Amino acid sequence: MRITTVLSSRLFLLVVIGVLLMCIGLLWPGIHEVPCTAPEVESDLMAKRLVAPPPAPCSGTVTVQPEPDTTNWGNHTLGVVVPFRDRFEEMLIFVPYMHRFLNHQKVKHRIYIVNQIDAYRFNRASLINVGYLRAREQCDYFAMHDVDLLPLNRNLSYGFPGQKLFHVSSPEYHPRYHYPKFIGGILIITMEHFAKVNGMSNNYWGWGLEDDEFYTRVRAAGLEIARPTNLTTTVKDTFRHIHDRRVRKRDMEKCFNQAAVTHKRDRITGADSVDYKILKANQLTIDGADVEVLNVRLQCDHTRTPWCDCSGQASDQASAKATAAASKAGHAKTSAGRAAADAKAGESPAAA
């Protein structure tokens, strides 16, 4: 009797353990499976998703949504020109987000990240000029677009602006800037109109004022600026501004005679005089969105805009490179001279 009771107890215990193991086996895939791709962002969830980090890489094949058929999307192509430096995390968010946003509006587009890699201060306007020169080969209009400003309202049109410029991030809806002449953030313009005003001034090294100078060019050319109206959203939820000023402080320094010069209209420089070199054009795909990243080295005329380098470090680096190059060239010339002399000394009298 005692042996039977013990066996029954052990049998019952084994049955219980078996049932538990079966339950764990059924639940295990649901607990540990991490999706490789995030779900499509809906308009009411955009703000929450934008601050999330990119999904972790998964082993195996990642399913990417097929590109839509753009045959019936019209004859215009938008170039999204993004002046850029040291914003890698923001770029990872920006590129796939804008690709989906523009596809939803059925806007044919190409995205250009214009990455400044020299040692000079950031020059947003010059980078936009470079982006325009690149994008005009394949696009008939473009958006000057900050990488840290993302549209949340799907009624913000990125379509062809026609005879007017279209300021997407208007003062009425921009989260930070609300003065009437503000045209920064996101501005859409045709290639024709940008050429008409000769692009933007190249004098603005450091942060600020290049948009205000561009506003004077636009008005002087008799061009009109349209802005979005009657949106149901406000300054709090029309855009998502993802710039963290604590991490990336703005370069507000003014040196030499920068303050005096940059408060005046520039009638000399523009898209036809930007001095630059594209060191490499990288074709990348981020979460299914194609982007061209241009590594650009800007050149600075220190006699005209010495404030491109308030610290003097860029000038020192340039001088060091020039000295090294000259030394290398001199060494090569000396070596060639010695080789010629040795060859001549080794000639036989008959050959001479």
Image (cartoon, rainbow, N blue to C red):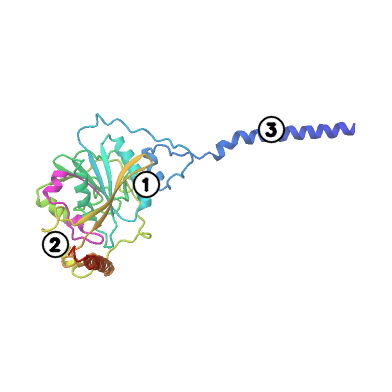
The kind of residue tagged 2 is Lys
Q: Nearer the viewer, residue 333 or 276?
A: 333
State how far apart marks 3 and 1 are (Cα): 45 Å
Q: What residue is disc 3 on?
A: 19
* Residue 183 shows up from this direction: no
The kind of residue tagged 3 is Val
Q: What residue is disc 2 on?
A: 264
**Above or below, comparing residue 336 to residue 43 in the picture:** below
> Any mark on residue 309, and which?
none
What residue is rendered at 15% in x and 48% in y?
Answer: 194
Q: Position of residue 60 (x, y in %)?
A: 48, 38
Q: Position of residue 187 (x, y in %)?
A: 22, 47
- Classify mark 2: residues with Cα within 10 Å, few (<14), some (14-19) or many (20+): few
State how far apart marks 2 and 1 are (Cα): 36 Å
The kind of residue tagged 1 is Ile
Q: Nearer the viewer, residue 118 or 197?
A: 118
Q: Which residues are the magenta region?
A: 186-212
* Residue 5 shows up from this direction: yes
